[in-house]
Structures are given as structure tokens and as C-alpha cells.
Amino acid sequence: MNELAILMKHGRQSVRDLRKAVVAAPFRGRPFIAKNISETEAGMLAGLCPVGAITASPVSLDLGKCLFCGECAFCLPGKIRFTNDHRMASNTHEGMIIRPGMDQPIRLDEERISKEIRSFFRHALKLRQVSAERANSPEIELNACGNVNFDMGRYGFEFVASPRHADGIVITGPVTRNMAEALKICYEAVPDPRIVILAGTDAISGGLFRESPALDRTFPESIPIDLFVPGNPPHPLTFINGILDLIGK
């Protein structure tokens, strides 16, 4: 009876529709850059950005490098802001580039999605997550994807313990030299056709550690990537919706 009382008190905790879910502030999602931002102002922001996500000529912001720290928006609130749009996953690097005046949702390039992905993984997808040296924030968010709130298992998605049982790998972390060979071995253990997902800024670009001699990004930069999931760390809704877009579900 105590369990029933708790359930009645808490009510329904799961997000009913992950496609229409709205994330409230202070979440920082897809950024918007005003059309009237000058190269001088963008240059100032570029000097402020610790990871070089902002360029001044031409003006742009790379979500694959962005830490979503919000310092640029604090500095020039009238010229740049972060929306609450969590659907930021892309299957191309170009898709992660935000330019002045762009305020449309980020969507995948359908022409770059292989037919095998849509035919083999539309109804079920098993993934092996590999932490290539990270502080565990992306891993916590990926774990949350399977909790009662987000419940990605309703779509047939789940993480598995062995790459032999997986349809693809999810890479988190900047990929250190100590993890480079292990990551490659894990990738090669996944049967073809396989999906590769980079989750989080560190995995996509190296993040704050991109200039560190401890990194070896040769392998992730030499293989085809099916999905980039920006964020530091990426939100569960960003990750799940990105996969839904990828497999066409």
C-alpha cells in the first residue's frame, strides 16, 4: 500500500511525447546569432570563447566545439542568445554551424543516411557506450536516457555490455592515447552494418582538451560518423531525438 501511495503522490513521471517535450530555462539549447552582429563584435566573442567555437570572418558558431557556457550571450545579450531548442543532433559537421539570422531547427541530411540504418535498426537498436576518458557528465545523461522520465526503451533503444551484441557504438570523451586502441578494438568488434555516434563536445571536437598532447583523435577522425550529438553534456532529449531522426522512427 505504501508503494501505491507513493505512485499516486508522484503521478506520471515519464515524458509522454519526447518529440514535443519542452525544456525550461536555465537549459541552453540551439543558439541564435542576430543578423546585425558585426565582425568586430564577433571577434571579441571569438577571443572570449575558450574552445574557438566562434569565428569572426565569416561570423559563425560551431556546436561541435561549443561548451554552452553562455559567456558569449552574457557578453552580448542583444546579439547572441541560447534558445531552449534541444534538437541539435546532426549527421554532418556543416549541420552544426550556426550563422547570423539562422533560426530554423537543426535537422539531419536525409541523403547522407544509409539505407541499411533505416531498414535494419528502425525497430530496435542496441548500442555499446565507450567512455574515452571523460569526467562522466555525458555518461550520466546517457544513463538518464533509460530512466523512468525519458524511457528510450519504449523505442527499442538500449545500451548493451558487449560490442558483439551491439549495432553500434556511442563515444564520449575526447579520446586519449590510452583509450585510442581500446576504442578501435571495440569498434571493430561490432558487426557490420554499424552505427557510430559521437556524444558531447569532447567526443566531437576534443572540447577543452583539444590541444592536449594526451589525446589521440586519429581513429574517430578517420571513420564515418553517423550522428553528432552536441552538448556539454548532451541532454537526453537531444540524444534520443537524434537517434529517432537517424533511424526514421
Image: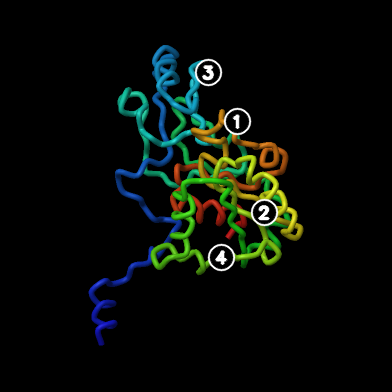
Amino acid at dot 4: Glu
Categorize mark 1 by other alpha carbons within 10 Å: few (<14), some (14-19), many (20+): few
Q: Position of residue 118 (x, y in %)?
A: 67, 58
Distance between the alpha carbons at the discs numbered 2 and 1: 28 Å
Q: Earlier in the sequence, mark 4 or mark 1?
A: 4
Q: Report the residue marked by disc 3.
A: 58
Q: Secondary structure at mark 4?
A: strand
Q: Earlier in the sequence, mark 3 or mark 1?
A: 3
Distance between the alpha carbons at the discs numbered 2 and 4: 14 Å
Distance between the alpha carbons at the discs numbered 4 and 1: 34 Å
Q: Report the residue marked by disc 2.
A: 195
Contact check, label 2 and label 4, Cβ < 8 Å = no
Residue 213 bears which disc, if any? 1
In front of the other: label 4 or label 3? 4
Contact check, label 2 and label 3, Cβ < 8 Å = no
Q: Report the residue marked by disc 4.
A: 158
At a point 59% along the width and 53% down the height, the residue shown is 130
135 or 73, nearer to the observer: 135
Q: Secondary structure at mark 2?
A: strand
Image position of 76 (left or right of 146) = left
Q: Quadrant of the N terminus?
A: bottom left
At a point 44% along the width and 54% down the height, the residue shown is 141
Amino acid at dot 1: Pro
Q: Quadrant of the C terminus?
A: bottom right
In front of the other: label 4 or label 1? 1
Distance between the alpha carbons at the discs numbered 2 and 3: 33 Å
Distance between the alpha carbons at the discs numbered 3 and 1: 30 Å
Q: Earlier in the sequence, mark 2 or mark 4?
A: 4
180 or 91, nearer to the observer: 180
Q: Residue furthest bottom?
A: 1
98 or 165, nearer to the observer: 165
Q: Quadrant of residue 107?
A: top right
